[in-house]
Image (cartoon, helix red, strand yellow):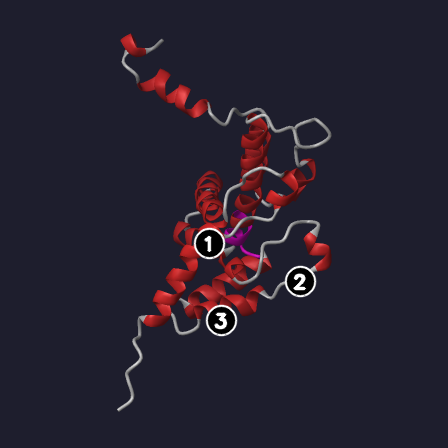
């Protein structure tokens, strides 16, 4: 008698594969020559940035945005991340990677369609997630510069060309604010606002 294949096995394999994203480096680590967020950390950040943009833009379909942000880079367990230099010399078949990853899982049809929608950039949700994907780079660049790494001819590197490519007004305004923001100031604000008066020193 043939052994019955578990309906959960494909999902388990996928979940293990997704967990491996924490070991996938983003390729710009090579030319910045500093530690940068791994793929799993990047995805986590993109989800929150996308949600913030969506709320400022008045977009209500947050569940779709979260799913799309969760999904947007997971194919990189199979197709390496590329940067603006490596893209000149390489191509990736992310559609195939997504299809193979999701095959026989409970996510297959829905998430394959979401990935295609994200790549087409026609819906507001896909545009928001792409804006968040781009903004996460600038959040991290500001942290790198704050740590004392001047990474472009002795001066802090600002991706000036990215400003005109945002789809949403909110993303552009966020980018503007990032140029003067202090990446560590959040804890000082929290202390001053919420500490008891005797602790405010």
Vertical placement of residue 191 versus 154, above or below? above
**Callout 2 environment at 10 Å: few (<14), some (14 to 19), or many (20+)?**
few
User: In this view of the protein, can residue 73 be seen by the observer?
Assistant: yes
Question: Which badge, 1 or 2, comes first in the chain's sequence?
Answer: 1
User: Between marks 1 and 3, how big is the CA–CA gap?
Assistant: 16 Å
| Circles 1, 3 touching at the beta carbon (< 8 Å) | no
User: In this view of the protein, can residue 106 be seen by the observer?
Assistant: no
Residue 91 tag number: 2
Vertical placement of residue 47 versus 17, above or below? above
SS type, badge 2 = loop
Q: Position of residue 130 (x, y in %)?
A: 56, 49
Question: Which picture quadrant has residue 140?
Answer: top right
**Residue that mark 1 sits on:** 21
**Residue that mark 3 sits on:** 100
- Residue 107 falls inside the magenta stretch: no
**Callout 1 environment at 10 Å: few (<14), some (14 to 19), or many (20+)?**
many
Q: Which residues are magenta?
A: 122-128
Residue at 29 percent of width and 88 percent of height: 2
Residue at 66 percent of width and 42 percent of height: 31
Q: Position of residue 13 (x, y in %)?
A: 38, 66
SS type, badge 3 = helix
User: Between marks 2 and 3, how big is the CA–CA gap?
Assistant: 18 Å
Looking at the image, is mark 1 or mark 3 nearer the viewer?
A: 1
Residue 82 tag number: none
Quadrant where the image shows the C terminus = top left
SS type, badge 1 = helix
Q: Is residue 190 left or right of residue 22?
A: left
């Amino acid at each position: 008698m043939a052994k019955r294949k578990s309906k959960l096995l494909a999902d388990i394999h996928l979940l293990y594969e997704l967990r491996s994203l924490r070991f996938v480096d983003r390729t710009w680590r090579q030319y910045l020559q500093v530690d940068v967020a791994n793929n799993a950390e990047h995805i986590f950040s993109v989800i929150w940035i996308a949600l913030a943009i969506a709320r400022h833009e008045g977009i209500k379909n947050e569940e779709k945005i979260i799913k799309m942000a969760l999904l947007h880079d997971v194919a990189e367990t199979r197709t390496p991340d590329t940067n603006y230099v490596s893209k000149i010399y390489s191509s990736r078949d992310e559609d195939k990677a997504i299809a193979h990853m999701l095959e026989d899982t409970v996510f297959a049809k829905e998430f394959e369609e979401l990935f295609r929608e994200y790549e087409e950039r026609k819906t507001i949700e896909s545009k928001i997630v792409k804006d968040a994907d781009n903004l996460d780079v600038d959040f991290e660049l500001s942290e790198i510069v704050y740590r004392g790494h001047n990474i472009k001819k002795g001066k802090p590197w600002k991706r000036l060309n990215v400003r005109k490519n945002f789809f949403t007004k909110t993303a552009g305004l966020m980018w503007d604010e990032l140029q003067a923001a202090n990446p560590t100031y959040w804890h000082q604000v929290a202390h001053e606002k919420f500490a008891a008066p005797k602790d405010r020193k």
